[in-house]
Image (cartoon, helix red, strand yellow):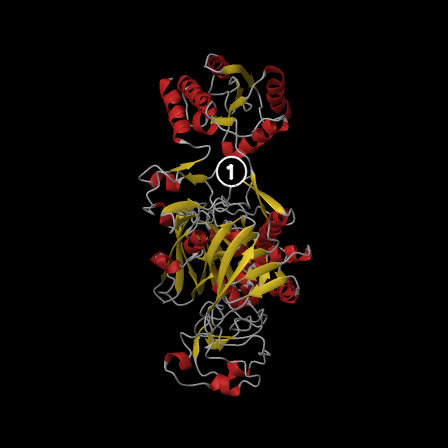
Amino acid sequence: MPEIRVGVYICHCGSNIADKVKVAEVCDFAATLPGVAVARDYQYMCADPGQELIRRDIQERGVNRVVVASCSPRMHEPTFRKVLESVGLNGYYFEMANIREHVSWVTEDPVAATRKAKALVAGAVGRVELHEPLEERYTVMNKTTLVVGGGIAGIEAALKIAASGNSVWLVEKEPSIGGNMAKLDKTFPTLDCSACILTPKMVSVAQSENIKLLTYAEVVKVDGCVGNFQVTIKKKARSVDLAKCTGCGICTSKCVVKVPSEFDGGLAMRKAIYTPFPQAVPNKPAIDREHCRQFVVGKCGVCQKLCPAGAVDYDQVDEDVTETFGAIIVATGYQQMDPSVGPQWGYGRHENVLTALQFERLVNASGPTGGKVKMKNGETPKAIAILHCVGSRDVNYHESCSRFCCMYGLKLAHLAKEKMGGEVYNFYIDLRCFGKGYEEFYNRVLDEGVHFIRGKGAEVITDRDGRLAVRVEDTLLGRWREVPVDMAVLSAAAEPRADAERVAQVLGIQRSRDGFFLEAHPKLEPLKTATDGVFIAGCCQGPKDIPDSVAQGAGAAAEALSLVTAGKVKISPVIAGVNEERCSGCKVCVPLCPYTAIAYDEEKKICRVNEAVCKGCGTCVASCPSGALSVKHFTNQQIFRQIEEVAAV
């Protein structure tokens, strides 16, 4: 076995590390460690000159193990592995010590920071000596992509993939695609008709030969790995045969059951057999079995009797469809927070307190009032209050900003002024008009005579005359005010969908603190997830406006196409393995594996790891009572050596 010669390279990271860590001192310390042949420091190790230092030392000084002490391995470990591979050294003879995030950014004392940096470098050197060469694995890519969610981000992703000539499935939980954008009247700052710009895209999805559209369906199981995801999709019984249905609407017109319309925010009624909205795709009805008399009491059958095409089928059952996909794009969107959780806003307690999406339906020409702003008594309001940040930037509900609410509130103020005249008030904390044309739109609304009161609407109450009023601390005037209005509109926070946790578990992806799906890196990999081949786009990743959702949809499509068009994809060799002689077949590891990569071999009475599915997370290793499981590149010997060396400094 050749002599181990370790090269250690300490990065200044400009001043990110060097401001707290005495880099030269750490470099001198590294040179004294056993097995170290070269120790250097450089301003930016990730830059080309820094990478060239490593290449030269491997070629000229016989370095065969490399340690770089710099930033997070999540950012640059692949970079340095490629450096080793470029000069013929196995990429897994590399180890990274994180002395930026783990030291300089969290340690104020330079002496303590330098000592900790030395300890981490010593641990990395000790560990890298035990590294073994690993070979990357490849799997053949299935060329079909799955898009989960039919809002604007999912629609854009599907259309971009289809335009490339590749096959894509689009799965939507509701009876129609369109998402929240389909509910809007106008879009800021250009005031385009939302339906006018969305509907053509929805129709293109339905007409594309490369897109298979499944509405009223949801993903219930995902097995396999990047390149070959085995996905089970549940097609819920629609009770209408889409192939036979002509969308004539006779069934809907004759249905005798009425229930509140989800699409109209409960402001209008729909039938038990219904098409969600006039521009729905597919423009064919579904039966709501929870309210249909045929399913509730066992008799009615009007829609089936009157359907001229014979499309109504009460005997339909849920159907599971299993298909293989190379990549998955998640674009499940967001939901609006229910403001009734905060009694101070009066939602659900006072008449004429609406959410922003409900008000959107009021001003929409296809909405319940034909675009006329009306109160519950049918009168036109003379004064409207629009409350910003309802549940956003609030430690009691959602700490983060919902991002599009400022512009959303300004747009609603413009529409209210346009539809009814009168007085319109915006109650805000700060106005964040950050996008192209946004500040100009704010100035336009100002010029239209909309009133702006800087102060979060503290409470919506009824005054002595039974009229609504908003109590607010006007921070510009420095006093409390009580503003009488006829209607209050709440810009409620954007929050993760109620089923976000279930979706995350099914797809094997993570959620951030705010509950939205977690990206691999907030700046460099905003569309990737920790699961290879699964990408996120749109508001499921965090609140964003329509242009950004469209951009992310297109970006996720590009990410997926970069995989499926390559024909094969590289898979990490860092996976778990079973020592068959030590395995007792207890099966403790089987249900714990988050990727369902472990199965029990009935013949040999032991557990086996499916290497194509395993992600090397180590959950099984930690749970194994007999120590039969281990993860390559994270063996007990490597980890114990690292701990010993860190503790010795």
Depth check: 596 or 46 in front? Answer: 596
Q: Position of residue 242 (x, y in %)?
A: 56, 74
Badge count = 1
Quadrant the C terminus occupies: top left
Q: Is residue 399 left or right of residue 10?
A: left
Q: Residue at x 61, y 24 (%)?
A: 51
Q: Position of residue 220 (x, y in %)?
A: 45, 59
- Please name the residue shown 54% across and 20% down the image: 9
Most foreground residue, 163 or 138:
138
Q: Nearer the viewer, residue 418 or 184?
A: 184
Residue at 52% x, 82% y is: 251
Toward the front, the furthest residue is: 603
Quadrant of res 372: bottom right
| Residue 328 image point, x, y percent | 55, 53
Residue 449 seen in the figure = no
Instruction: State the SS at label 1.
Output: loop
Residue 92 seen anywhere in this rendered image of the structure: yes
Q: Which residue is mark 1?
A: 573
Return the residue nearer the eye: 612 or 540.
612
Query: Where in the figure is residue 388, as x and y percent of width and height?
Result: 46, 53
Quadrant in the rendering for residue 411: bottom right
